[in-house]
């Protein structure tokens, strides 16, 4: 009863914090991307980079800027890792002698640039502080800002009529970083450090164990990275235990703060969308869909963890294996559902130790396309793409040309939306199937049967959805997994982005049409049910066979 009450209070506190931030943060982000004024620091940056902030770009140019910026980021981060022996604060770390191997450097570079933050290494043993701060933390800001920019470009497309341009990527990137991500992450870092998160440039603290042996406890500047890791829905931990490590999240209060940070921007972006559209009910419908799915998944996972089916867990009365006692089951479930519902991938417990039902919920949450509520930017444009599919299906049922927010949805728009939502399932199913049939893959699994299959499926789902969390019973340090998962991260990130920007370009070219008597209302509960049903239907039809072979079998066994 005490645990239940504590869990309900934690959930209530989280909802209160999100509700309090929803209007001011959402409206602030709308002002950021609609203001005609440029800050002095921004103007200096534009001059240095020879960017004309007054010019706007067609969708092709906008997309080329996204791809070009990301490609350069991958190259620079790869080179930075390979040069670690020459950098300060390296401490002789690395997985290949005293440096990071080429395969791992490639995987890491792709992972952080795509906002995945998948980690196949032990951070405190492989990455020095310079790599963490100058490489990974910088990409935590940049990758989140890219997703934010794409979401804003799609929002502008609905607003514009017979237009060729979507805005300026470099302006959107700069504003998202300097006006939103940086100041809020700065304040959040101070709060986390005040709550006990570590912040030091030392390599470690020398201690003497109770048996008299010497040991060094690794330490790092984790407070600053932890803030943007959550606020930018990145997820990469500066320690191997991620947010379960007391230097990253020392207590239950910091745990709730981190859950709030990883949810607040995706949730508030629906308010930004409604404000920019001039109809805030549109945003309320989207956030209602997100919130309903999130709450349902929390309830199912919580039930599964408190009513386990294993003999050891039954004897204990709950499934506490792999969880921190300072968080308990409620805090662990809240974090797990929130981090898999966004593109964060941070963890405060071991997902591999969850019950079959709760582990299945975490996996399914990723396979929804991470729209409940999704990552920074990715959640908004992801659910808008699915809303377009929902409107198209409704149009087919009544025999009318579908319209959404004053724009007709024809062949081009629906094709772009379908490409966007099919990219992830294609990568997940093909990647998982290939990994399972290869003869050497079995050596990477510490478990066989349904749970071993779930580990492989989870790995490719996490990479292809740019999440980054994992079932830790699988070893992915081989060249095959480093390369295959890296490719899935790239395609899983940029195919949907390109399709979304192509969709935005087509929508912007259209003239806005006035809603008529036959137009489907998109600002009420009925449309919310339609969108939510579409999200669940698409995932159920696509992934049910794979889920039946893994977590469903395990949950029923």
Image (spheres, rainbow, N blue to C red):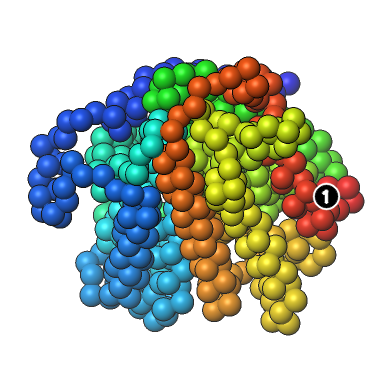
Percent of width and height locating residue 352: 68, 54
x and y percentages locating residue 246 in the rendered image: 46, 44
Residue at image location 46% in from the left, 77% down from the top: 103
Q: Answer with the quarter of the image where residue 37 lies.
A: top left
Q: Badge 1 is on which residue?
A: 552
Is 398 placed above or below 121 here?
A: above
The answer to whether residue 151 shows anywhere in this view is no
Q: Is residue 431 visible?
A: yes
Q: Residue at x 26, y 39 (%)?
A: 175
Q: Secondary structure at mark 1?
A: helix
Q: How far across and down, in percent of the image, does residue 42 sit?
A: 16, 41
Q: Residue furthest right?
A: 557
Establish if 157 lies above or below 94.
above
Residue 104: x %, y % from top left:
45, 73
Which residue is more in the foreground, 498 or 315?
A: 498
Q: Nearer the viewer, residue 36 or 84?
A: 36
Residue at 47% x, 18% y: name it.
Answer: 280
């Amino acid at each position: 009863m005490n645990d239940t009450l504590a869990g309900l209070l934690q959930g209530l506190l989280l909802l209160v914090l999100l509700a309090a931030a929803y209007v001011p943060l959402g409206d602030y982000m709308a002002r950021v991307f609609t203001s005609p004024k440029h800050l002095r620091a921004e103007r200096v940056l534009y001059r240095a980079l020879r960017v004309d902030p007054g010019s706007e770009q067609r969708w092709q140019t906008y997309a080329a800027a996204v791809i070009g910026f990301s490609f350069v980021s991958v190259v620079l981060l790869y080179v930075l890792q390979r040069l670690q022996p020459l950098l300060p604060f390296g401490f002789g770390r690395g997985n290949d002698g005293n440096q990071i191997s080429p395969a791992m450097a490639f995987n890491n570079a792709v992972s952080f640039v795509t906002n995945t933050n998948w980690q196949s290494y032990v951070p405190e043993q492989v990455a020095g502080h310079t790599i963490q701060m100058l490489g990974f933390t910088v990409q935590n800001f940049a990758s989140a800002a890219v997703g934010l920019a794409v979401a804003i470009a799609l929002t502008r497309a609905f607003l514009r009529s017979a237009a060729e341009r979507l805005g300026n990527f470099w302006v959107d990137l700069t504003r998202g970083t300097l006006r939103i991500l940086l100041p809020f992450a700065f304040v959040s870092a101070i709060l986390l450090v005040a709550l006990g998160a570590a912040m030091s440039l030392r390599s470690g603290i020398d201690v003497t164990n109770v048996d008299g042996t010497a040991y060094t406890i690794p330490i790092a500047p984790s407070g600053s990275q932890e803030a943007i890791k959550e606020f930018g829905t990145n997820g990469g931990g500066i320690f191997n235990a991620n947010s379960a490590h007391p230097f990253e999240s020392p207590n239950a209060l910091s745990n709730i703060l981190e859950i709030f940070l990883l949810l607040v921007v995706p949730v508030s972006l629906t308010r930004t969308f409604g404000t920019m559209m001039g109809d805030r009910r549109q945003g309320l419908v989207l956030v209602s869909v997100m919130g309903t799915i999130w709450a349902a998944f929390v309830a199912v996972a919580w039930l599964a963890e408190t009513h386990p089916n294993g003999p050891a867990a039954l004897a204990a009365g709950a499934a506490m294996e792999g969880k921190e006692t300072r968080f308990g089951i409620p805090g662990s479930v809240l974090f797990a559902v929130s981090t898999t519902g966004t593109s964060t991938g941070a963890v405060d417990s071991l997902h591999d130790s969850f019950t079959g039902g709760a582990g299945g919920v975490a996996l399914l949450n990723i396979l929804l396309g991470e729209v409940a509520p999704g990552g920074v930017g990715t959640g908004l444009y992801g659910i808008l793409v699915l809303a377009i599919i929902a409107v198209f299906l409704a149009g087919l049922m009544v025999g009318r040309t579908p319209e959404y927010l004053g724009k007709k949805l024809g062949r081009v728009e629906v094709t772009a939306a379908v490409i966007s939502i099919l990219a992830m399932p294609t990568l997940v199913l093909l990647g998982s199937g290939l990994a399972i049939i290869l003869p050497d893959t079995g050596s990477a699994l510490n478990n066989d049967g349904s749970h071993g299959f779930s580990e492989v499926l989870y790995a490719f789902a996490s990479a292809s959805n740019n999440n980054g969390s994992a079932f830790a019973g699988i070893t992915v340090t081989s060249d095959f997994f480093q390369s295959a998962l890296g490719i899935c991260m790239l395609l899983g990130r940029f195919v949907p982005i390109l399709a979304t920007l192509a969709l935005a370009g087509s929508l912007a070219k259209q003239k806005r049409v006035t809603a008529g008597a036959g137009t489907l209302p998109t600002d009420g509960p009925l449309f919310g049910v339609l969108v939510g049903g579409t999200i669940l239907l698409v995932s159920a039809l696509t992934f049910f066979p794979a889920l039946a072979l893994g977590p469903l079998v395990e949950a029923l066994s």
